[in-house]
Image (cartoon, helix red, strand yellow):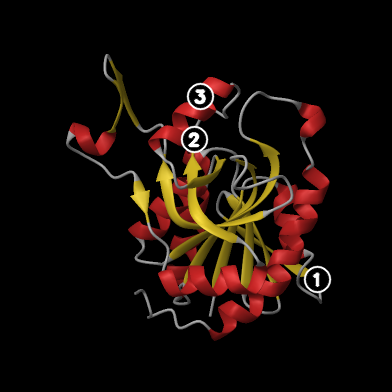
Amino acid sequence: MRVLVATAVPAERDAVAAAFPGGTTEVRLPAATLLRTAGGYDLLAAGVGPALAAAGTATALTAAALEGRPYTLVVSAGIAGGFRPAAPVGSLVVADEIIAADLGAETADGFVPVTELGFGTVSHRPPDPLVRATAEATGARPGAVLTVSTVTGSAARAADLSARHPHALAEAMEGFGVAEAAAAHGVPVMEIRAVSNPVGPRDRDAWRIPAALAALTGAFGKLAPVLESWNPHDHR
């Protein structure tokens, strides 16, 4: 297994790194820097939002392919907003579907995804066996994770997203970009998130970012053995 873990910001990357004993070494790529663990994990803080996530992930995937040592799995990881009551603050979510929730058009009849306009894609599905094994090992709840370019800040938008995606558990800003880059390279992808705040009106007093980062560290401590035993050719 050779795994690329793509986060948005260094704090998330460092939380993942804390799960691996022995520390990390720094690897510089064109326009990107990785932290490499002894166990075959490369950790990337790609930036905030789907565009930077896709660009940074694609850079790392291309560099690995040119080295002749391609990645076998890409993981989008970090903290996220959780949809209440299914994903309370402090919980873990593993995506069984990664959805671009605001890629499309507003119409008089409501939002229309880009696929209904006749082009593109709005969804990627991680391998089911890996999702199930991750949920069992970490206690993460499986469900859809939405990728948004604008973080939800109102009850009305939270309700709209929940209505359009009733199986959604969380929203973040990078998963779909990471998944698009992985798909372009033919590499399977998964997404795991620790919930730091509820989706809805922005209330900084309700944010629990340190606790979510700690939960992310704990999740990767339990996830590593799962990935080491997972067959990357099993995409059922």
Which of the two discs, 2 and 3, sits closer to the camera? 3
* Label placed on residue 157: 3
* Residue 99 falls in image quadrant: top left
Q: CA distance from mark 2 to mark 3?
A: 12 Å
Q: Earlier in the sequence, mark 1 or mark 2?
A: 1
Which of the two discs, 1 and 2, sits closer to the camera? 2
The answer to whether any part of residue 71 appears in the image is: no
User: Could you say which is closer to the camera, residue 231 or residue 156?
Assistant: 156
Secondary structure category for the residue under label 3: helix
- Is 102 left or right of 169, judged from the image as shown? left
The answer to whether any part of residue 16 appears in the image is: yes
Secondary structure category for the residue under label 2: loop
Assess whether mark 3 and mark 2 are in contact (beta carbons under 8 angstroms). no
Assess whether mark 2 and mark 1 are in contact (beta carbons under 8 angstroms). no
Identified by mark 2, the residue type is Val
Q: Earlier in the sequence, mark 3 or mark 1?
A: 1
Q: CA distance from mark 3 to mark 1?
A: 41 Å
Report the residue that reaches farthest toward the top.
108
Identity of the residue drawn at 57% across and 77% down: 227
Identified by mark 3, the residue type is Arg
Above or below, 111 against 212 in this view is above
Residue underneath mark 1: 23
Identity of the residue drawn at 65% across and 76% down: 224
Report the residue that reaches farthest toward the left.
118
* Label placed on residue 148: 2
Above or below, 97 against 121 in this view is below
Above or below, 23 against 152 in this view is below
